[in-house]
Amino acid sequence: MAQSTGESRFLTASTGVLGLLSSFTAPSFIWQLATGKSADEVLVPSLVTSAVLVLALALGFAFLEVRKLRAELNAIFFRGPQRDAFQALVRHFGFCLNTKSIHYVVEADGRATVEYSFGLHAKRIPVGSWRRAWGLDNSQIPASSSDVVIDGRTVVSQSVTKPGKRVETFTLSPPLNPGETSTLAFKRRPPPGTFEYMGSTGGSEDGIIVPIEEPVAHLHVTLECRGVDSIEFYSRAQFADGRVLEDESLDVSRRLEQTRGTDRRTVALKLDYPIAGVEYELGWKKLPAQPA
């Protein structure tokens, strides 16, 4: 493993100190014996000095290991680098989503319902509108905007179709002022055929993709597959061009929570500070029938 700059400097300094100590104490030890002092009078102070130096070196190594361990724990459990990136994006965007919650319910015949909840938080600028881009070929096609609800505000939703996507703009009246928060919630019903028939022959595979397009503090995605049992879930984090982020995918897989009911399987992902520009995929694969 490559050593950090600080650790390399510490090792170099430690080696130099040990060399200096040996070059100083050995002649001194011989000279003091030659002048008539007893071995105990010479040896005890030398041993004490050496012990103090060894203890200091041990404490130095322990300090470096604690720093490394804290950095690793910060990255694994508290997502320190992702939090720093989130804070930098908030300063740039001027707003964020405190929460991004999406709940999918997929039936065995492929029908689905999706519930969305977005916690808008205006930071340094007012937020009077918010825009979503939905792919025309996936589960996030908005059916209508009549069911949009937001705390104490009037919401007008307009959508236009552009090449390969449909853009929906939510206008808030009055707008959110800096420091204010509000929750935008609505439900969508994807068109029939969006998902494959989950009761078909083994090997069918499908899933959902959640893109992160602005700074998000807390992502919560739940996928509930009904009328099925023999499926396995998988997850990954990737860019839009398909490049997979191995470390982030591993972190996502560690945070998946799966539950099994009588006729349903559910997987939930709770992730702090998802990376902007990355797509988080939750998928399922129907397992082949087991031989009798």
Image: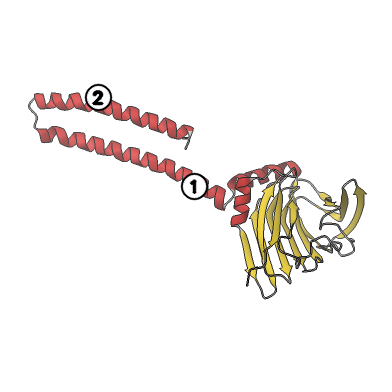
Do labels 2 and 1 touch, CB within 8 Å? no
Up-down: is 83 above or below 30? Answer: below
Answer with mark 2 or mark 1, whichever residue precedes in sequence.
Answer: 2
Expressed as whole percent of the image width and height from the top left, the position of residue 87 reads 66, 45
Expressed as whole percent of the image width and height from the top left, the position of residue 144 reads 90, 61
Quadrant, the C terminus:
bottom right
In depth, the one of 38 and 75 nearer the eye is 75
Expressed as whole percent of the image width and height from the top left, the position of residue 285 reads 69, 60
Element carrying mark 2: helix
- Which residue does the image show at 87% across and 62% down from the upper left? 191
In depth, the one of 28 and 115 nearer the eye is 115
Up-down: is 82 above or below 13? Answer: below
Residue beneath label 2, please? 23
Element carrying mark 1: helix
Q: Quadrant of residue 188?
A: bottom right
Q: Quadrant of residue 115?
A: bottom right
Q: Quadrant of residue 30?
A: top left
Q: Assess disc 2: are there few (<14), some (14-19) or many (≥20) residues with their C-alpha within 10 Å of its C-alpha.
A: few
Residue beneath label 1, please? 70
Up-down: is 22 above or below 288? Answer: above
Expressed as whole percent of the image width and height from the top left, the position of residue 261 reads 66, 73
Considering every residue shown, the one lying at the far left of the view is: 36
Give amino acid for label 1: Arg
